[in-house]
Amino acid sequence: MRTPALLLACFILAQADKQVMGLLAIDVQQSFGLTNTQLGFLQGGAFAIAFAIGGLPISRLIDSGNRVKLAAACVALWSVATILCGFAGSFAALLLFRAATAVAEAGLPPAAFSIFSQQRDPRRVARLTGIFMLAPFVGTGLMFLLGGNLLEIARSGVVDFVSAAEPWRVVFFAVGVPGLILAPLLAMFGREPPRTPPPSNQTTMPDYKSIFRFIFREQPFLRNYYFALTAFYAATASLLAWYPASLVKTLGMTTGSAGAHAGATYLVGGIAGALAGTAYFSSHRALSPALMARAFVVLAALLGPVVIALPLMRDLAPSLALYGLFAFFSSAVLALMPVPVQLTLEDRARARGTAILSLLMSACAGTAGPLFVGVFMDTTGEPLSVALLWTMIISSLASVWFFARAARSTAPKFSSTI
């Protein structure tokens, strides 16, 4: 369990590095004089596109190389890039460093999922994956909570060397440094498990073209499943990027207070949902992709009214209550989302199958969701709440529709070959 624990710790840090812009959005916007569209791209597109594109070549290495060593190198690289964000002197420089952070972070999840997939029992795969996927909720929640407090300390000038810099720069530095400790620990103490032998009828490693064809032409289940997760993540990415800012703009809270409230709520709701989903799916003796798709239809349908109502709240208590429900239902899906891919693709294609899913979720949903919110405000003059409302309506309906189509499709068999 040492290797999964180290991978989990690294992934928690990755999520903190990834979501830190959600906390610092208002401060960065004021520091560089950014438009809402620029801020939306910085929060979504700059990170998501780089994450998705960077994951493709890295995943090719992961499918054939030492996954633990590659993951450790990625941790070190993204930590350095995050620290450099705190030294950015312009919007272009910050954009570049955020992209570098994303490219490096793209290597960790495919490596971890590939390692977990070598378990023979599908329930064990689901359990390890579900625990690993606690990281987005723990990392994001702690970052909002602790980062918000650090931001307030930096503003107060209590510590001289902290108050010498703009407060948001201090947060980037604090979030980046722990990775320089975790990276060597993973490299030294992580264990690379032996790979599953390839099918006897395959002598060469499948290329990206054959993997794309298998997912989007030969497997209706996977095709609809990938599109469903893309639509689902559009809502998630938009709320994560803009919810703290919405508390500031709608309720007049400070950035630090908004981050602390959002972080604590997301931390509790996300962990509870991820654990509930993991317990439910790992208890099924006949766990299958089809069973998971049917459950995700229900969860997406339950989440829809929550995220549509959330932007309409004008009081803190009901807003946080709905945000907690959003964290619970979304985490139950996102924590287990890689499992059907892990159970379907063979060992030498799993990392790239995960990278393709990240390409859709990050480059498309992770970009389009937050960016749409910013563009909507700049072009229509409507407030943030209205922009979020329309984003939630569109993405929620699309996710339910595609999950339902996946559930009706012929589910692939375990360990299907390409």
Image: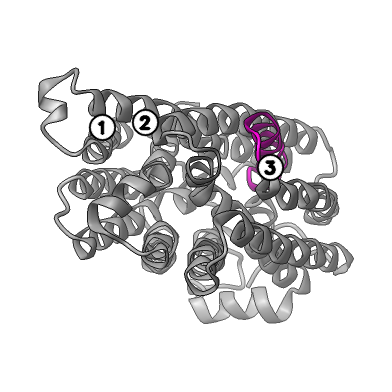
Pointer 3 residue: 313
Q: Quadrant of residue 27?
A: top left
Q: Are marks 2 and 3 in contact (CB under 8 Å)?
A: no
Mark 2 and mark 1: Cα distance apart in space: 9 Å
Residue 161 located left or right of residue 370: left
The amino acid pointed to by label 1 is Ala
Residue at 83% in and 56% down: 290
Pointer 1 residue: 174
Query: Is residue 315 part of the magenta span, yes or no?
Result: yes
Residue 147 marker: 2
Q: Are marks 2 and 1 in contact (CB under 8 Å)?
A: yes
Of the pair 22 and 200, the residue shown nearer to us: 22
The answer to whether residue 275 is above or below residue 82 is above
Mark 1 burial class by Cα count in 10 Å: few <14, some 14-19, many 20+: some
Q: Earlier in the sequence, mark 2 or mark 1?
A: 2
The amino acid pointed to by label 3 is Met
Q: Are marks 1 and 3 in contact (CB under 8 Å)?
A: no
Q: Which residues are magenta?
A: 314-335
Residue at 49% in and 46% down: 249
Mark 2 burial class by Cα count in 10 Å: few <14, some 14-19, many 20+: many
Residue 179 located left or right of residue 199: left
Mark 2 and mark 3: Cα distance apart in space: 25 Å
Give the label, 1 or 3, closer to the camera. Answer: 3
